[in-house]
Image (cartoon, grey):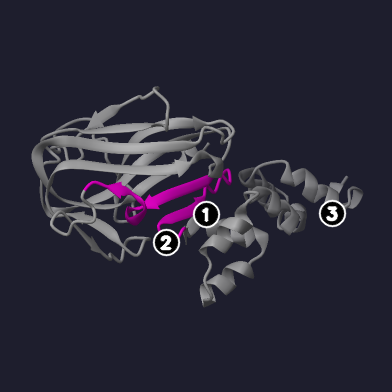
């Protein structure tokens, strides 16, 4: 018996909306009769985050791209946000979705970070790079004390989700100091004494194993700073900090930002 003749389309769409984006996509492929229900706005409205309209309105200016985003079906909008991070908070933060689950990813761009001596041209330069999603990135000229901090409110993240924080960076050909002393990473809830610090070389020799930095495939490198569990978004602010206390001179790194995304796509 064909269930599509037994149940109303709205009922089928409601049942599908109780699954996941991955399951819905698979169902559409396995049973073409379900495709109209799978593609309906009512299904993908459920998969989009409840505050997606507010997030999008925070990003939009009057442009052809903004008109295009607002005219998309809910399914097309979902996949657009998976593959095209949008800039919010005056272009200092990016927002996207994990395709398999619909959970939120944020990257705090260099202009949204607290960078020690970041406003001093003697130590840092601000420039535009074609491969960056942000208007500006920060290039280190020379410092001894290296410290960068990101802060983000847990209430805007997906609930009941294990997040990891990643430093997103690249090196220029001429660099110094990041192969000599490990950087200390710390990810914690502001006001908490429960810190789980870790340390790693950002630019280790190629014969050192394991290589903790990973190529992102977008012209940038990332290294995991730490992780945390966001229960209900009521833990206040999560702080992501990296520091090297000035024992060696450092130069030649470019910072795009610090990204928070669900670990293992969960």
Are the residues flagged by discs 2 and 3 in contact, CB closer than 8 Å?
no
What residue appears at the point 76 percent right and 52 percent down from the top-left corner? 34
Distance from label 3 to label 1 (Cα)? 27 Å
- Regarding residue 35, the answer to whether it shows in the image is yes
Find residue 224 and report its horizontal and vertical position in percent: 34, 37
Are the residues flagged by discs 1 and 2 in contact, CB closer than 8 Å?
no
Instruction: Provide the secondary structure element on which disc 1 rests.
Output: helix
Distance from label 1 to label 2 (Cα)? 18 Å
Instruction: Provide the secondary structure element on which disc 3 rests.
Output: helix
173 vs 183, left or right, is: left
What residue appears at the point 56 percent right and 36 percent down from the top-left corner? 233
First along the sequence among labels 1 and 2 = 1
Instruction: Provide the secondary structure element on which disc 2 rests.
Output: loop
Foreground tag (2 vs 3): 2
Q: Nearer the viewer, residue 160 or 212?
A: 160
In the picture of the structure, the residue carrying the numbered disc 1 is 82
Foreground tag (3 vs 1): 1
Find residue 156 and report its horizontal and vertical position in percent: 54, 45
Distance from label 2 to label 3 (Cα)? 41 Å
Magenta extent? 89-116
216 vs 157, left or right, is: left
Foreground tag (1 vs 2): 2
User: For residue 58: magenta?
Assistant: no
In the picture of the structure, the residue carrying the numbered disc 3 is 9
The residue carrying pointer 2 sits among few (fewer than 14), some (14 to 19) or many (20 or more) residues within 10 Å by Cα, namely: some
Q: Quadrant of the N terminus?
A: top right
Q: Relative to residue 82, is residue 69 depicted above or below? A: below
In the picture of the structure, the residue carrying the numbered disc 2 is 91
């Amino acid at each position: 018996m064909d269930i599509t003749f037994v149940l109303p389309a709205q009922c089928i769409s409601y049942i599908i909306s109780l699954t996941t984006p991955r399951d819905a996509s698979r169902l559409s492929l396995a049973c073409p009769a379900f495709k109209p229900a799978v593609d309906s706005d009512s299904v993908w409205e459920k998969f989009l985050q409840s505050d997606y309209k507010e997030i999008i309105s925070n990003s939009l200016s009057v442009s052809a791209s903004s008109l295009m985003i607002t005219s998309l079906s809910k399914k097309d909008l979902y996949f657009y946000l998976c593959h095209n991070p949008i800039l919010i908070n005056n272009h200092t933060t990016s927002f996207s979705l994990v395709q398999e689950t619909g959970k939120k990813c944020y990257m705090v761009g260099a202009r949204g970070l607290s960078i020690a001596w970041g406003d001093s041209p003697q130590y840092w330069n601000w420039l535009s790079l074609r491969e960056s999603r942000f208007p500006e990135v920060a290039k280190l000229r020379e410092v001894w004390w290296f410290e960068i901090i990101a802060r983000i409110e847990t209430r805007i993240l997906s609930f009941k989700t294990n997040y990891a924080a990643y430093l997103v960076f690249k090196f220029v050909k001429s660099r110094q100091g990041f192969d000599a002393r490990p950087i200390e990473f710390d990810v914690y809830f502001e006001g908490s004494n429960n810190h789980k610090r870790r340390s790693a070389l950002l630019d280790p020799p190629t014969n050192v194993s394991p290589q903790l930095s990973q190529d992102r495939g977008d012209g940038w490198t990332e290294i995991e700073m730490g992780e945390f569990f966001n229960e209900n978004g009521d833990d206040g602010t999560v702080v992501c900090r990296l520091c090297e206390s000035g024992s060696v001179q450092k130069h030649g790194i470019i910072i795009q930002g610090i990204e928070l995304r669900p670990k293992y796509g969960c």
